[in-house]
Amino acid sequence: MTEKQRIKMIDLRSDTVTKPTPLMLKAMMEAPVGDDVFNEDPSVQALEERVSTLFGMDAGLFVPSGTMSNQLGIKVLTEPGDELLIDEKGHIYNYETAGVGVLSGVQIQTIAGERGKLNPDLLANTVRGAFDWEPKTKVLCLENTTNKGGGACYSKEELIALKKFADDHNLMVHLDGARIWNAMIATGIEASFFGNIADTISVCFSKGLGAPVGSMLLSTKERIAKARRFRKMWGGGMRQVGILAAAADHALTHHYELLKTDHDRARQLAEVINSKEQFSVDLDSLETNILLFDTKEESAMEFIEKMSAHDIHMIPFGPNTVRVTFHFQISEAEMDVIMQAFNAL
Ligand SMILES: Cc1ncc(COP(=O)(O)O)c(C=O)c1O
């Protein structure tokens, strides 16, 4: 793809494709910085304080990616020989290159949930460790919103039931909150509620919020101190990284409310898709900015290639499943082009 094509394209492949805005760049330029490996970067410290307070957690650790904060979360909750429970659609299971096996010596037990979500009934009889020859089930991993599950959110009641299950079975809870901000907007659940449910939380600033880089692990002071050591070991200790923390801080302040528009647009498009014979879409399951729909006669790839001729880009999520992800850098004019293109099909 040429640079010209890339600039022009309407990019619905992911909410990670946004570029820093001029105001974000200004905030980055003006950020006070120091050496964060020496624990001396004021912008990083301010962001860690801001986000950990928001979620009602003791401490936070700014890291380069959601993958690293998920992996650190599992590392500090487990020992080699342990096992974690996760929905079979979970990011940690599917897209983190078997990291928990390599980095933590932990085995994964997958469970077939609903749109990437688990519940206590599905978890019945999954917890092991009573005998020496069994893996010890230690962590329940939840994802909110679910990526491969099409942006589904947990309700408060569902989370309370899962927390009770975890407590009853001596499990720790890790929450992959890469898109927790979308879940908060869609459900109205306050951040501090998640802090009461999970022992470790990973949040990303680089998805719909639009920061170029950055995620954070939240937990107790003791676990974050431990995670800090592994972050260094894994090459994630960064120096004057306050410029990135400032971008994340700016994104949280100025882009959080914009997520609502992404959700509304996903629904607007889903309604058009629903009116077309050649697709099937489950309108009831659409909750946030990720829209999954099925192509009936042509393959997902054939349809995606057809749409790329209109400079509208999406990704396949299965042989007949297409994923569209909205983000705040789709302009009104681009939204019109998208709607016209789908309406004309
Ligand atoms: C649910 C979920 N968790 C974790 C990640 C990993 O984030 P990163 O790409 O920053 O490593 C992603 C990335 O899309 C994700 O969707």
Image (cartoon, grey):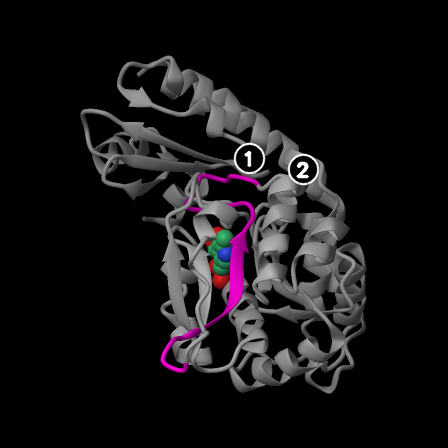
Which residues are drawn in magenta? Answer: 132-153
Residue 185, which numbered label? 2
Picture quadrant of residue 186: top right
Residue 23 on image: x %, y %? 72, 49
- Residue 224, relative to residue 183: is it above or below? below
Residue 127 on image: x %, y %? 46, 64
Measured in 3D between alpha carbons, the distance from the residue under mark 1 to the one under mark 2, in whole angstroms, is 9 Å
Q: Residue at x 69, y 50 (%)?
A: 251
Is 148 in front, or is 25?
148
Residue under circle 1? 288
Name which residue type carries label 1. Answer: Thr
Name which residue type carries label 2. Answer: Ile
Query: In terms of sequence position, does the residue under pointer 1 or pointer 2 come before the other?
Result: 2
Label 2 C-beta lies within 8 Å of the nearest ligand 1 atom: no
Magenta stretch: includes residue 35:
no
Q: Are marks 1 and 2 in contact (CB under 8 Å)?
A: yes
> Main SS of the magenta segment?
loop
Q: Residues within 10 Å of mark 1 (few under 14, many from 20)?
A: many
Residue 158 on image: x %, y %? 60, 42
Q: Secondary structure at mark 1?
A: loop
- Residue 315, relative to residue 64: is it above or below? above
Q: Residue at x 62, y 85 (%)?
A: 229
Residue 194 in sight in this render? yes
